[in-house]
């Protein structure tokens, strides 16, 4: 508190700092940053720079502050100025590269890594950031070539080796997967559902073909289904789903689509519809979602609106995931009200989409050996199967995918 009071006295009365006072205020600013008081720290740095605009230590620290607080344009301006005075500072180059990567300005990040590589040849820190940038720019082959050449020179660098394996795994364009779902009811026969699917990554987006098989009420049926995720822009993509079944256990035809968009500050949202043809009736469902990444967590809410002549039925599902090393490593929790037409384990009918239900689901997803993706889900639902009549259901779902 003593240093904090001194700092604000200088700010208010505009005292002229000696070198020792400036050094003390730098320590004050660092302490404020540790307390997440970014606005106060910014004032201290700017006060120092008002007295000495060429103080590169203060300028660099302010640039880091802007970068950490997602003010990427301000940080870029400062790092550019500092690099003119410190053209051979690895520390400044790394900060400038990180700033561009965090701001998703990957072409500018690549330019900085290429310049830095001429000053610091064979430096692992610079090379790793260049490889990551190439990967973000979908130049996976160039990233793999760069990392492979460095690994052959320095086999002891485990970070380079791990990144190389991760990019190789992401570069595998094909996967085949199987899944099995078992629904348990206390006084009824269990339901079973299985699928076999093939996924292919293309330059336009991922495409999935799926064969679904169900055993319910003593009868069996199948459904053919396809998903596509075409990329539209660097910040948006579409989701398209189509399915057909001759069996009464599935809708005879289904069609769905979403428009997905990324927004600043790790927000995302989508809007779309699901159309289901049940032979005797047809249902249009409107949906979308709002989601946000907070550190390693992803939180999203998706509603479903089913209009009818007399009322609009509403369902909603809240999902929270905690990611670990990769996008294929996470645990998740979902709670919901109503029925989701996107969950394959549910028996979809015109009536079920308008009945009440409460559900919770926990999931675990993990990738092994960079090729095998294992997923397990456990769910409990208390669902209305006829007006004001409820029953409990316990669901276990297992899935395995192989990347190649």
Image (tube, grey):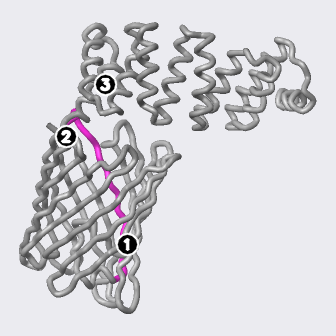
Above or below, 193 against 44 in this view is: below
- How many neighbours does mark 1 have within 10 angstroms: few (below 14), some (14-19), or many (20 or more)? many
Which range is magenta? 355-371
Q: Can you give x and y, in whole percent of width and height, for residue 339 in the image?
A: 32, 74
Q: Can you give x and y, in whole percent of width and height, for residue 28 in the image?
A: 77, 26
Taking depth in this image into account, of 112 and 8 the one nearest to the observer is: 112
Q: Can you give x and y, in whole percent of width and height, for residue 157 in the image?
A: 34, 14
Image-based side of 340 in relation to 207, left or right: right
Residue with the mark numbered 2: 372
Identify the residue shown where x is 26% and y is 80%.
283
Taking depth in this image into account, of 321 and 110 the one nearest to the observer is: 110
- Mark 2 or mark 1: name the one nearer the start of the chain: 1
Magenta stretch prevailing secondary structure: strand
Identify the residue shown where x is 86% and y is 32%.
8
- Marks 1 and 3: which is nearer the front? 1
Q: Is residue 235 visible?
A: yes
Q: Is residue 362 magenta?
A: yes
Q: In which quarter of the image is the N terminus?
A: top right
Q: Can you give x and y, in whole percent of width and height, for residue 147 in the image?
A: 29, 18
Residues at marks 1 and 3, CA–CA distance in whole angstroms = 41 Å
Residue with the mark numbered 1: 304
Identify the residue shown where x is 67% and y is 37%.
36
Residue with the mark numbered 3: 162
Answer with the quarter of the image where residue 181 lies: bottom left
Q: Say what secondary structure mark 3 lies in.
A: helix
- Marks 2 and 1: which is nearer the front? 1
Answer with the quarter of the image where residue 371 lies: top left
Please tell me the numbered disc located at residue 140. Answer: none
Count of labels in the image: 3
């Amino acid at each position: 508190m003593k240093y904090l009071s001194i700092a604000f006295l200088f700010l208010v009365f505009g005292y002229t700092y000696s070198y020792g006072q400036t050094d003390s205020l730098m320590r004050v600013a660092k302490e404020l940053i540790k307390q997440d008081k970014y606005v106060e720290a910014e004032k201290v740095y700017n006060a120092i720079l008002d007295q000495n605009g060429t103080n590169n230590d203060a300028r660099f620290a302010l640039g880091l502050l802007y970068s950490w607080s997602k003010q990427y344009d301000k940080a870029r301006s400062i790092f550019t100025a500092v690099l003119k005075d410190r053209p051979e500072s690895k520390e400044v180059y790394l900060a400038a590269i990180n700033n561009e990567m965090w701001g998703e300005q990957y072409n500018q990040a690549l330019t900085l890594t290429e310049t830095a590589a001429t000053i610091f040849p064979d430096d692992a820190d610079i090379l790793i950031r260049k490889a990551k940038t190439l990967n973000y720019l979908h130049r996976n082959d160039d990233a793999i070539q760069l990392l492979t050449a460095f690994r052959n020179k320095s086999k002891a660098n485990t970070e380079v080796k791990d990144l190389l394996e991760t990019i190789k795994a992401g570069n595998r364009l094909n996967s085949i997967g199987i899944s099995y779902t078992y629904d348990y009811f206390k006084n009824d026969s269990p339901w079973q559902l299985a699928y076999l699917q093939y996924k292919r990554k293309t330059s336009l987006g991922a495409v999935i073909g799926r064969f679904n098989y169900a055993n319910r009420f003593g009868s069996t049926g199948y459904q053919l289904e396809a998903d596509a995720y075409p990329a539209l822009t660097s910040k948006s993509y579409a989701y398209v789903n189509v399915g057909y079944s001759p069996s009464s256990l599935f809708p005879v035809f289904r069609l769905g689509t979403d428009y997905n968009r990324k927004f600043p500050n790790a927000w995302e949202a989508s809007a779309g519809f699901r159309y289901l043809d049940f032979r005797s009736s047809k249902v249009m469902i409107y949906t979308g979602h709002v989601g946000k990444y907070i550190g390693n967590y992803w939180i999203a809410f998706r509603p479903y609106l089913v209009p009818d002549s007399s009322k609009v039925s509403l369902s909603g599902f809240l999902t929270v995931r905690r990611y670990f090393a990769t996008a294929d490593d996470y645990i998740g929790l979902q709670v919901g009200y109503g029925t989701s037409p996107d969950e394959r384990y549910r028996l979809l009918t015109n009536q079920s989409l308008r009945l009440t239900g409460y559900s919770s689901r926990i999931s675990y997803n993990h990738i092994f050996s960079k090729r095998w993706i294992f997923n397990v889900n456990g769910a409990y639902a208390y669902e209305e199967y006829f007006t004001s009549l409820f029953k409990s259901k316990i669901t276990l779902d297992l899935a395995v995918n192989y990347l190649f």
